[in-house]
Structure formats: structure tokens, C-alpha cells
Amino acid sequence: MPRKYWLDLFTGKTWEEFLKNGARISGFREGRRKYSKKIKLGDYFICYLTGISRFIGVLEVLSGSYYDKTPIWEEEDFPVRFKVKLIYKLDPKTAIPVLSFKNKLSLFKDLKSPNAWSGFFRGSPAEYSPKDGRIIISAIEDAVKNPIEREYDEKKYWRRPRKIYKSNLGVVTIPEKAIEEIEPLPVERIEKATHEEIQWMLLQIGSDMGLDVWVARNDINKEFNGKFFKDIPNLRNKLPRQFDDVTNRTIELIDVLWLQGDAIVAAFEVEHSTAIYSGLLRMSDLVTMQPNIKLDLYLVAPDDRREKVFVEINRPTFARLKPPLPKICKFIPYSKLKKEIKNLGPKMRFMKPEFIDEISERCEINKVAQ
């Protein structure tokens, strides 16, 4: 079986911790558990530093994925883990800037905006094309033999994405303004999606899979690019009456629902440019009124709003619900949703609703002692 090449993201801090602990284990967030099963023995992780946008090393995968929370990294567990072997290692000064590959990688071709390439480096693991993987590894190998030193911003190298504390109230995060001061978030200007476009996509995906779909009662007459929501096949005009009237009124205002028969299998709130609260409040109301409801909840938002979503959903108001909202709600960035739709194309009709989990990320933040 041909070797595959995967993106493995590090900050300077997590890279140093990885090396300090023997460079034998690499890990990913819990939300990548299913996706990580695609990675096989002998595959290569290409290590990328997010703060300074450089490739710094290559790891060979020595095991299948396994779940372990043994402390390695200070700020997160990264419990979806692989045993690895460090094949090539650079340092921050000799690491290779991603933009030096501008005329070589498919990542930089047919872009709709100059910064669209950055979407690939939003989360890991992510699969490179075989050609791109080989080009990057060849360049890293050459850089090990013939290092070229380049200055870098140490503040960006050591940046901390967020700081979380354990308190009597549960998970408490520092204010969003402080997070942005610690880590200025790169704003991806790939495609200016609208709330209606994402809603329409979610409705169309559900319909293509043969599910019934529902759009928020007050959005039924909206349209995207001349295509009206009410014309989407399998759009329901009435919800199953399995809940009380108060619960049903809440459910009717959720942006998009996927249904199989009378069972709601997934609920989506699209948070485009609002304060995040509207969707979270609807979801928290639903959980409060129906604590035993078995339903996958998703927040879909622009990539650059990820930190804001995580800050808001982990506030004690939502984190102390039974069950905690961050534990049962997942985040999907616009870029991953669009990429998945593009990649699957006509194969979408063969997919099961569970595929959406592979592009989603858990909103639960691991507690870190002060």
C-alpha cells in the first residue's frame, strides 16, 4: 500500500514539549479520533509550526491510533495518539517557510484569493496529495543536509493559543480579547460565504443523502444564489410531534435539522457574524428541556471564529448543564464543510449522516490546572 502523507500541526511550545518527551509520540484532539483511523503504519507526518508558518520535521508512523491521556503537553492532552519515529528534524531558524513552496505545491494552485492556501493548515491530521508530500519531504531532507538560517519571530513561535483554568465553577477561560492578544488569529479570506449559503449547503447535503431536512421556520422563504430553500427535495413542512409544545417551538427555530423518519439525527446552528449566543441559547434550551435527548449538535462558523465559539460554549452557563453543552456539541469550520462537499461530489448520496463527525471537532476543552 502506498505511503500517505499527513499534516501534523505544532506550536513552538508543543514542538518543544514533543522533543523533550523523547519525540516518540504525536497526538491530536479527541474530535479527530475517527478520522485518525485512516492513518496507517509507515505513513509520514509532516510537522508544521503554526506560529511562524514553517515545516520543521518529518515523523514515521509506527503504530495505529490509540487513546491515551498520559501528560506530555502542558495545555492539552491530545489523546488520539500514535507512536512515531523522528526521521528529519530542523530547528526554528532552518525550518522551511511554507511560502517558499508557492510555485511547487497544488495547495497554491487555483486559489480564489491569495491567502486561500492557509485553510489547509487549520487543523490536523489532514492528508496531503502524494506529490505535495514528496516535494515537502525532499525539501526538508535537503534542508537537513544544507541548512539555511532565516530569522523568525520568537513571540509567534512561543505563542499560546488559549489559557484555561480549573475552578470550582468548572472550566473558566480568559476573555476573548486576551486570547486575541496572545494569538492573533489569521483571518482566511478564501470565499465570502453567507449564512444562507451554509444553510443551503447543509440542507442540500441532507437531502442528497436521502434524509428529510428542516430549515428554521423563519427562514423558509430565504434563498441562496437564486435557489430557494423551499424548493430543496425532502424539505419537511412539519416536524414530528414527539416533544411538548415549548420544546417544539425551540426546535423549529434551529437553522437546519436532518431527520430519518420521525427521528432527528443532527441539528446545526450556523453562526456567521452574530455574537454566537443565539444558536447556543437554542441548543442549551433544548438540552435543559430534554436532557435525555439523543441528538448530534453542531455549530458551523467561519474558520476565524473558532476561538470565539470555544470561549462562549465553555462558559459556566453552558458547561454546567446536564449534560454539559461543550461535551455534546461539535464545531465545523466553513472551510472543512466546503472542502468535504467538493471532494465527495456525486458520492454524497452514498454517505451516511455520521460522515459529518469526521470534519467536526469537539467543543469540550480539557481542564488544565492553574
Image: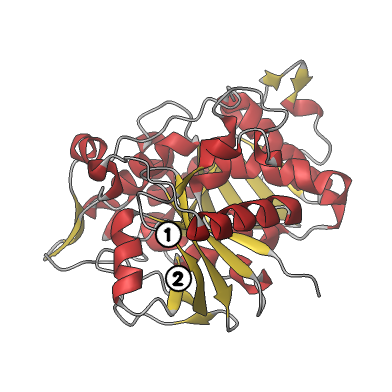
Q: Nearer the viewer, residue 56 or 185?
A: 56
Residue 112 at x, y = what percent? 66, 23
Is any part of residue 143 visible from this angle? Answer: yes
* Tag 2–tag 1 contact (CB < 8 Å): no
| Horizontal side of residue 198 vs 364, given as left or right | right
- Viewer-nearest residue: 82 or 95: 95
State whether residue 124 is above or below residue 185: below
Q: Quadrant of the C terminus?
A: bottom left
Point 43% across, 26% down: residue: 273
For residue 25, what is the image quadrant? bottom left
* Residue 73 badge: none
Left or right? Give the position of 197 relative to 317.
Answer: right
Local secondary structure at mark 1: loop
Name the residue at 41% across, 47% down.
50
As drawn, 364 above or below 70: above
Residue type, mark 1 in image: Leu
Q: Position of residue 63 (x, y in %)?
A: 58, 84
x then y, percent, for residue 362: 45, 59
Q: Between marks 2 and 1, how big is the CA–CA gap? A: 20 Å
What residue occupies the far top of the structure in this picture?
226
Which numbered dot is residue 90?
1
Q: Residues within 10 Å of mark 1 (few under 14, many from 20)?
A: some
Q: Is residue 62 above or below residue 263?
A: below
**For the residue marked with disc 2, what is the amino acid?**
Gly
In the image, what residue occupies the spot 42% across and 64% down? 291
SS for tag 2? strand
Residue receiving disc 2: 27
The first of marks 2 and 1 along the sequence is 2
